[in-house]
Image (tube, rainbow, N blue to C red):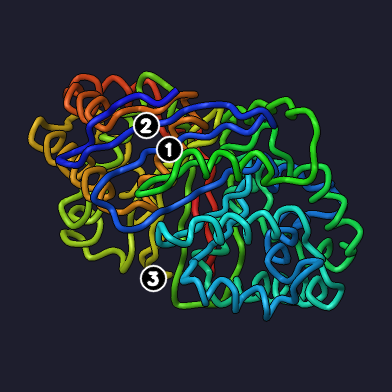
């Protein structure tokens, strides 16, 4: 049943219901918005790749819109363009995300096309082969993007198998994936049970929910959620030797997922470290010491665990000093973080959140994440209240209880760093 929930100065109605086919629908109809955004989270991610076929989930995503039983890839693309429907797809560790944006008068056509893609994909052999070639090219291209390569290696080292491998797979596994593998993965995992669909903007809720009931042709029971891997308990590191004037440093250490009580304290701490040009890492590592050309930190959340990443790009000569200073700043933050820094980080956090409300696409993704991580729609005022409640002691306490050691470290450059 819908519930009234005011959002900013606009009138809105929030929906949260599980449909007869097992699909969970959440939406926020916002009067005054001219567009509609829809987001889907399908319970099929890279962690579901068979060991010998790493990259399979991503190939399904890459070929899903490449033609159906009714339309070729070109005709399908023309239909989306003719109605001004923008779409995007991304394979994640735990799930695959799809998104669409369109005008309200094209809602019926947008849902019709989405159903065609999800229920009648053709997976042409030529398109499957092209997708495999492109995946391999992207993996090879990592050699030209050493920081991206460092993070691919870091994630695999930190999470292990099957959670840590690159969503694109590996150069030795992608070629062996067949059209049948792609079709079988789609058939068994692209199902309504366990799938979440969110909508934001000026949509027709009754018509939308009716269309969502027949969105998938495949059916099956919801899959049991696998608990995300625990954080490593021992320090691990890996060095990739590369003759270069530059050295890339990437490290990972434990944090908490979005549904954890300390989530907002953790995010505030990351804001203190990397909240733009006023963040400690930028001012201390780059501005004061001129050690790096790039430095920062960010956090990521899976359903059962969280991780914080820190990174730096520097010269080979200053790599050892950079790593030492980077670690020192990460360790120092919970010891002497100030009220001014916490307030500045909270303002940045809230500004980003509130500005996202202007975008129906961002709001649809937020609704999706609310249900995925918290099993309910969280009103924006409640999020603001949670952010405002974070105090200096909470940030200090979190940092002290979640030290960066043992950390996972990956470096790419001339020499390994101790």
Q: Is residue 212 above or below residue 80?
A: above
- Mark 2 vs 3, N-terminal side: 2
Residue designated by label 3? 315
**Residue 59 image point, x, y percent:** 74, 62
Q: Is residue 251 left or right of residue 155?
A: left
Q: What is the secondary structure assignment of the residue under circle 1?
A: strand
Q: What is the secondary structure assignment of the residue under circle 3?
A: strand
Residue designated by label 1? 27
Residue designated by label 2? 14
Q: Is residue 160 left or right of residue 27?
A: right
- Mark 1 vs 2, N-terminal side: 2
**Frontmost residue, 278 versus 62:** 62
- Mark 1 vs 3, N-terminal side: 1
The quarter of the displayed image where residue 348 is located? top left
Q: Decide: marks 1, 2 in contact (CB < 8 A)?
A: yes
Q: CA distance from mark 1 to mark 3?
A: 49 Å
- In this view, the mark in front (2 or 3): 2
**Frontmost residue, 344 versus 359:** 359
Q: Is residue 173 above or below residue 324?
A: below
- Is residue 36 in sight in this rendering? yes
Q: Is residue 168 left or right of residue 276?
A: right
**Frontmost residue, 131 versus 315:** 131
């Amino acid at each position: 049943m819908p519930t009234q929930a005011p959002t900013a100065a606009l009138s809105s109605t929030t929906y949260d219901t599980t449909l007869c086919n097992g699909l969970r629908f959440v939406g926020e109809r916002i009067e005054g918005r001219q567009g509609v955004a829809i987001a889907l989270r399908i319970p099929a991610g890279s962690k579901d790749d068979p060991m010998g076929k790493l990259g399979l989930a991503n190939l399904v995503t890459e070929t899903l819109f490449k033609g159906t039983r009714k339309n070729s890839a070109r005709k399908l693309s023309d239909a989306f363009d003719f109605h001004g429907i923008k779409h995007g797809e991304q394979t994640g560790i735990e799930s695959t995300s799809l998104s669409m944006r369109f005008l309200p008068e094209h809602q019926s056509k947008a849902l019709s096309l989405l159903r065609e893609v999800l229920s009648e994909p053709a997976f042409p052999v030529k398109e499957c082969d092209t997708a495999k070639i492109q995946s391999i090219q992207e993996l090879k291209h990592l050699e030209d993007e050493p920081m991206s390569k460092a993070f691919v290696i870091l994630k695999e080292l930190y999470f292990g198998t099957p959670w840590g491998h690159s969503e694109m797979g590996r150069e030795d596994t992608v070629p062996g994936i067949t059209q049948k593998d792609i079709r079988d993965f789609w058939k068994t995992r692209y199902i309504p049970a366990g799938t979440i669909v969110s909508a934001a903007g000026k949509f027709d809720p009754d018509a939308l929910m009716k269309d969502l009931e027949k969105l998938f042709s495949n059916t099956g029971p919801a899959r049991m959620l696998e608990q995300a891997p625990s954080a490593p308990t021992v320090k691990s590191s890996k060095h990739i030797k590369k003759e270069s004037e530059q050295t890339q440093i990437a490290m990972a250490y434990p944090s908490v997922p979005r549904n954890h009580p300390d989530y907002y304290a953790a995010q505030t701490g990351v804001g203190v470290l990397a909240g733009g040009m006023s963040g400690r890492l930028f001012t201390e590592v780059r501005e004061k010491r001129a050690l790096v050309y790039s430095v920062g930190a960010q956090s990521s959340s899976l359903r059962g665990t969280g991780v914080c990443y820190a990174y730096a790009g520097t010269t080979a000569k200053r790599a050892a000093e950079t790593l030492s200073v980077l670690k020192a700043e990460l360790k120092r933050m919970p010891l002497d973080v100030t009220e001014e820094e916490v307030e500045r980080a909270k303002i940045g956090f809230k500004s980003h959140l509130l500005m996202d409300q202007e975008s129906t696409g961002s709001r649809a993704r937020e609704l999706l994440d609310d249900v995925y991580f918290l099993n309910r729609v969280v009103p924006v005022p409640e999020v603001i209240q949670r952010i405002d409640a974070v105090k200096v002691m909470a940030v200090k306490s979190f940092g002290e209880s979640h030290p960066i050691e043992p950390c996972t470290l990956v470096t790419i450059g001339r020499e390994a760093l101790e």
